[in-house]
Amino acid sequence: MEKEKVWDIYNEEYAANYNDTFLLEPYSKVSADQEVKIIKELINTDTKWLDIACGTGYFLSQFPGVQRAGYDLSPAMLNEAQKVNPDALFFKQGDFRIDVPEWHNQWTLTSCMWGAYAYVDSLAEVETLVANMIKWTAPGGTVLI
C-alpha cells in the first residue's frame, strides 16, 4: 500500500462522489444500513469511537453527539468526513499499519469497515492493523472489522 497511489485514487473528485457511488446506491445501501444497525447496538452514552480508514465519515455521521474520531490515509476523504461530522473529536491523516501509542486503551469502539484492510500488501500487514486496533481499544471495548 503506497500512500501516493491511495492519494491518486482517493482524490477530491472521488471523495465527493464516494458515498453516492459506493455506499448509498441500492445494492450497497443494504450493507451500509446493516453496518449502521450493528454500530447502533454497540454505542451508548459512554462510547468513544475511532473509525479507522473512515473515508468520507459516512458511518460516523450517522451518530451525531457520540464521541467519535476518524483516521484515514487520504486527505480528500478526511475533508469530506470533516464536513459531515462537525462535532467529531478529530480527524487525523495516517497509516493504520503504524502504531499510535497515545491511542493505547483509549477507545471503547474501534472499527475498520468496508474491507479497508484489503489495501495492504500482505497478511502480516493485516495482522499489524488488527494488533493496532486491539492496542487502541480499551479493556472491555469492541473491535469491529
Image (cartoon, rainbow, N blue to C red):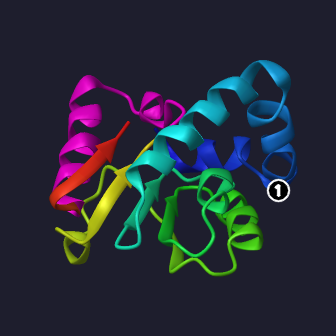
x and y, in percent, of residue 77 in the image:
69, 57
Q: Nearer the viewer, residue 4 or 115?
A: 115
Q: Residue at x 61, y 42 (%)?
A: 5
**Magenta segment, which residues?**
113-136
Which of the pair 109/7 is nearer the observer?
Answer: 109
In this view of the protein, which residue sits in the foreground, 64 or 83? 64
Locate residue 101, reporting x and y percent: 19, 72
Asked which secondary structure carries label 1, the reply is helix
Q: Is residue 119 magenta?
A: yes
Rendered residue at 81%/35% (across/down): 24
Of residues 18 and 14, the one nearer the viewer is: 18
- Residue at (43% x, 46% y) in the render: 41
Q: Is residue 65 above or below residue 20?
A: below
Residue 95 visible to an observer of this rendering:
no
- 72 lies left or right of 142: right
Rendered image quadrant of residue 88: bottom right
In magenta segment, residue 112: no
Q: Which of the 4 image quarters holds residue 61? A: bottom right
Magenta: predominant secondary structure element? helix
Q: x and y percent of residue 33 in the render?
A: 66, 35
Side (left or right) of 107 relative to 3: left
Residue with the mark numbered 1: 12
Say above or below: 113 vs 48: above
Q: Look at the image and tell me in which quarter the C terminus lies.
A: top left
Q: Mark 1: which amino acid?
A: Glu
In the rendered image, the vertical position of residue 120 relative to residue 36, given as above or below: above
Q: Height in image: 133 above or below 45?
A: above
Q: Residues within 10 Å of mark 1 (few under 14, many from 20)?
A: some
Most extreme residue toward the top is 27
Residue 123 in picture, x, y percent from top left: 26, 24
